Amino acid sequence: MFFPLLLGFMPSDTARHHRSCILDVLQEALEEAKIKPQDVDCVAYTKGPGMGAPLLSVAIVARTVAQLWKKPLLGVNHCIGHIEMGRLITGAENPSVLYVSGGNTQVIAYSERSYRIFGETIDIAVGNCLDRFARVLKISNDPSPGYNIEQMAKKGKKFVELPYTVKGMDVSFSGILSYIEDMSHKMLSSGECTPEDLCFSLQETLFSMLVEITERAMAHCGSQEVLIVGGVGCNVRLQEMMGVMCQERGAKLFATDERFCIDNGAMIAQAGWEMFRSGQVTNLQDSWITQRYRTDEVEVTWRD
């Protein structure tokens, strides 16, 4: 596991870590599964979105392995990896999906061979907002800033009103981050509130916005299922708030534990398998990376 020492994941450091570990991880996976390269059906890799350097490091290895083993290659959208793993683990059939992570915030639903985005952040992702506020409070990155904010929020007792910005189906987090960055020192030094109160208030406000746009998407789609995916989906308080909304609507909430909420190779393998069994293959000349690879750009050939 790679933990950044200071202010988050630097693309060059992350790529260097991937390059140093990837062959060992590949060998370990084969040994644990008790299979040989000839038993593998296809090779899947993350095409995007994400940071260019680590994406490229993995894509090069995937292309090389696919050619050496003479296996089909599949370039997978990162978000769709989360969705397909979530559907597999939870059994959700046709949910409205809330995808929340350090780099993305989207409300998604399936329609006509596409995962369509009904709402999203218009600036920064919810996980990015939490991570950047953690730096303001000098909260540790180990095991993650968001997790540590969640634990501090459980001890908060006072709610501090913060900017709440929902625009139709979209949300904005940059305003609330700017406000709390500017005001936190004054509020803390005056004794108006504690760091735990600020973590509690930030979580409650951010998650209320997410619940609102998810419920709006459910009403639009006629959906009675919600699936939360992405790293921020591990947050128990977010799951609680979404669960209350679902209960009031007579709907059902699906969420996975931290093994499958956070980024993992199994989710890319699952999405790649769905693509492969429906007849998709990524040609070598098309196996580049795309840092801005939107969820709704993918043709979903494996669902009715």
Image (cartoon, helix red, strand yellow):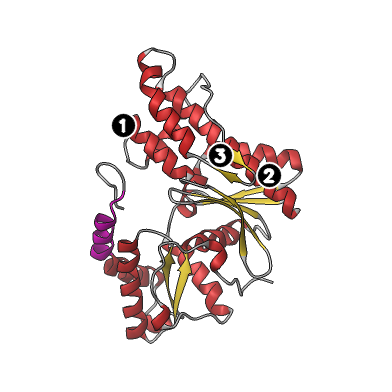
Count residues near mark 1 (Cα–Cα under 10 Å), then give few for <14, some for 14-19, many for 20+: few
Query: Mark 2–mark 3 contact, CB under 8 Å?
Result: no
The Cα–Cα distance between marks 1 and 3, rounded to whole angstroms, is 23 Å
Q: What element carries label 3?
A: helix
Q: Upstream in the sequence, badge 2 or badge 3?
A: 2
> Mark 1 — residue?
138
Q: What residue is shown at x 40% (from left), y 62% (from top)?
A: 291
Q: Quadrant of the C terminus?
A: bottom right
Percent coordinates x, y for residue 40 in the rendering: 43, 79
Q: Give the left or right position of residue 261, taking residue 112 as reference.
A: left
- What secondary structure is marked by label 2? helix
Q: Which residue in the structure is indicated by mark 3? A: 238
Q: Which of 39 and 222 is in front in this view?
A: 222
Q: Does the magenta stretch include residue 288?
A: no
Which tag, 2 or 1, sits closer to the chain's start? 1
Question: Which residue occupies the extreme bottom position in the image?
Answer: 70
Q: Where is residue 266 in the image (x, y as percent from the top left)?
A: 45, 64
Indicate the quadrant where residue 246 lies: top right
Which residue appears at 59% of the width and 42% of the height?
210
Q: What residue type is labelled 3?
A: Leu
The answer to whether residue 222 is visible is: yes
What is the spatial separation of the Cα atoms under label 2 and label 3, in whole angstroms? 14 Å
How crowded is the residue under tag 3: few (<14 C-alpha within 10 Å), some, or many (20+)? many
- Of 162 and 278, which appears nearest the observer? 162
Q: What residue type is labelled 1?
A: Lys
Q: Which residue is under mark 2?
A: 215
Q: What stretch is highlighted in magenta?
A: 9-21
Q: Of the residues shown, which amino acid type is indicated by label 2?
A: Glu
Classified by dominant secondary structure, the portion drawn in magenta counts as helix
